Amino acid sequence: MAIFEAMADTHVDNTKWVRTYDGMEAVGDWIILPGPDWVLVVILLAASGFSFWISISKTESKQ
């Protein structure tokens, strides 16, 4: 998924975010921006790398 996101021509983002008691809420307009969303690319790469590392790591079982 990170590869597809990195090759994207555009991405969608909001013009204004406000903090609420339980997180962030989009209150502005949704606009189309040129290029990929690099923050999402980095997050997806980190998640896939972590998942790969967990899948190949040795597990110890106490028997």
Image: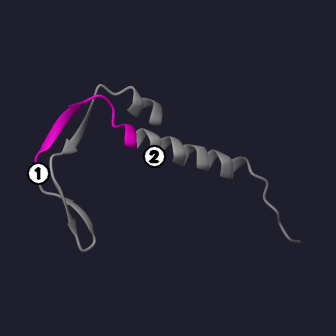
Horizontal side of residue 29 vs 59, given as left or right: left
Precedes in sequence: disc 2 or disc 1: 1
Disc marking residue 8 = none
Residue 12 screen position, x and y as percent = 23, 39
* Image quadrant assignment for residue 36: top left
At x 46%, y 36%, the residue is: 2
Classify mark 2: helix, strand or loop. Answer: helix
Indicate yes or no whether the magenta region holds residue 38.
Answer: yes
At x 59%, y 44%, the residue is: 49
Quadrant of the drawing holding the N terminus: top left
Indicate yes or no whether the magenta region holds residue 60.
Answer: no
Q: Which residues are magenta?
A: 29-39
Horizontal side of residue 40 vs 53, given as left or right: left
Residue 45 screen position, x and y as percent = 51, 41
> In this rendering, is residue 2 above or below 51?
above
The answer for how far apart the CA atoms under marks 2 and 1 are is 24 Å
Which residue, given by chain and number where applicable, does mark 2 sit on?
43
Q: Residues within 10 Å of mark 2 (few under 14, many from 20)?
A: few
Classify mark 1: helix, strand or loop. Answer: loop
Disc marking residue 28 = 1
Amino acid at dot 1: Gly
Quadrant of the drawing holding the C terminus: bottom right
Horizontal side of residue 52 vs 58, given as left or right: left
Q: Residue furthest right?
A: 63
At x 73%, y 47%, the residue is: 56
Amino acid at dot 2: Ile
Q: Residue furthest bottom?
A: 21
